[in-house]
Image (cartoon, helix red, strand yellow):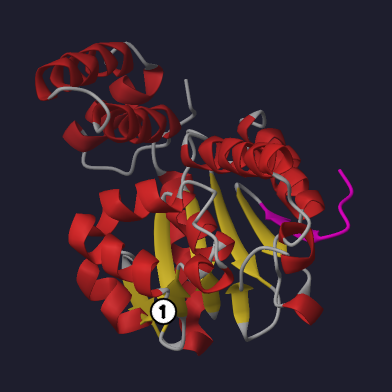
Amino acid sequence: MSFDNLLLDRDGAIVVMTINRPKVLNALNSQTIDELRRAMLECTGDDQVRAIVLTGSGEKAFVAGADINELAVQTPTSGREHALAGQHVLDVIENLGKPVIAAINGFALGGGCELAMACTLRLASDSAKLGQPEVSLGLIPGYAGTQRLSRLVGKSKAMEMCLTGLPVSAEEALRIGLVNRVVPAADLMAEARKLAEHFARSAPIALRYIINAINKGLEMPFGAACQYEATLFGLVASTEDMREGTKAFLEKRKAEFKGR
């Protein structure tokens, strides 16, 4: 597949996707959002892809926000459709069934913060800044930012970040649970790849069911979520990977998972 605003680097079971609009700090326009959708769906349909690293080009920004030129001309109808289209793509990423690691190499603001939150895990460089500054434009987050942020950091902190529009540092993002790790900027991609390599060696069906259990379970009553988890446990217990994993443990060797 060819893209104008995305760079794809395939290394075995790992795909590195780089949003490539450095002149506008990798701002998300409609074309970039659609390219992300197509690239992610291509990866989910490829059984050889086990993990994805998502980052931004250059040293300043992961994604500095949405494309203001597009936002400025929205009408009530087109604005709603614009938000729904972005939400759909971020839902695809969140529920891809394969780990998507956000390597946040700089500003992750507005749509960039929303994109990072839709990823499975978030690694941030020590110089990164994350936030939802839409209120400064007379807007609100539109790619489910109010919803994912409150689920990640809690209602009070989400209210503060969205109402003030002020960004937080990488260290503060780690403290409140918005990112999983903070690493020196020079080590960011190496650490992201190391994590992706770990996932590439893991059992892909088990990874997919864990992602499903957590994402879906959070939206269910606790009892229903436990029943859903038990169903997934039963399904994964029938896989060749489960038999290989338990056998390898008993034989004191490394398991070789095939995704079957």
Quarter where residue 27 is shown = bottom right
Q: Position of residue 172 (x, y in %)?
A: 27, 79
Q: How many marks?
A: 1
Say which quadrant the N terminus sits in: top right
Can you give x and y, in whole percent of width and height, for residue 220 in the image?
Answer: 22, 23
Q: Residue at the location (47% across, 41% down)?
A: 94
Which residue is located at x 43 percent, y 55 percent?
A: 117
Find disc 1 in the rendering and name its residue.
167
Horizontal and vertical percent position of residue 20: 77, 68
Is residue 194 depicted above or below 107 in this figure?
Answer: above
Magenta run includes residue 10 = yes
Judge whether residue 159 can be spotted in this image: yes
Front residue of 15/202: it is: 15
Residues 128 and 9: in front is 128
In magenta segment, residue 148: no
Question: Is 5 on the left-hand or right-hand side of 113?
Answer: right
Assign a secondary structure to mark 1. Answer: loop
Dot 1 amino acid type: Pro
| Horizontal side, residue 42 vs residue 104: left or right | right
- The percent coordinates of residue 67 (x first, y second) are 73, 64
Seen at 59% across and 59% down, the residue is 54
Q: Residues within 10 Å of mark 1 (few under 14, many from 20)?
A: many
Rendered residue at 52%/35% (across/down):
96
Note whether 224 is above or below 173 in the view shown.
Answer: above
**Range of residues picked out in magenta:** 1-11
Viewer-side residue, 65 vs 71: 71
Q: Is residue 231 above or below residue 243?
A: above
User: Is residue 177 something that shows in the picture?
Assistant: no
Image quadrant of residue 212? top left
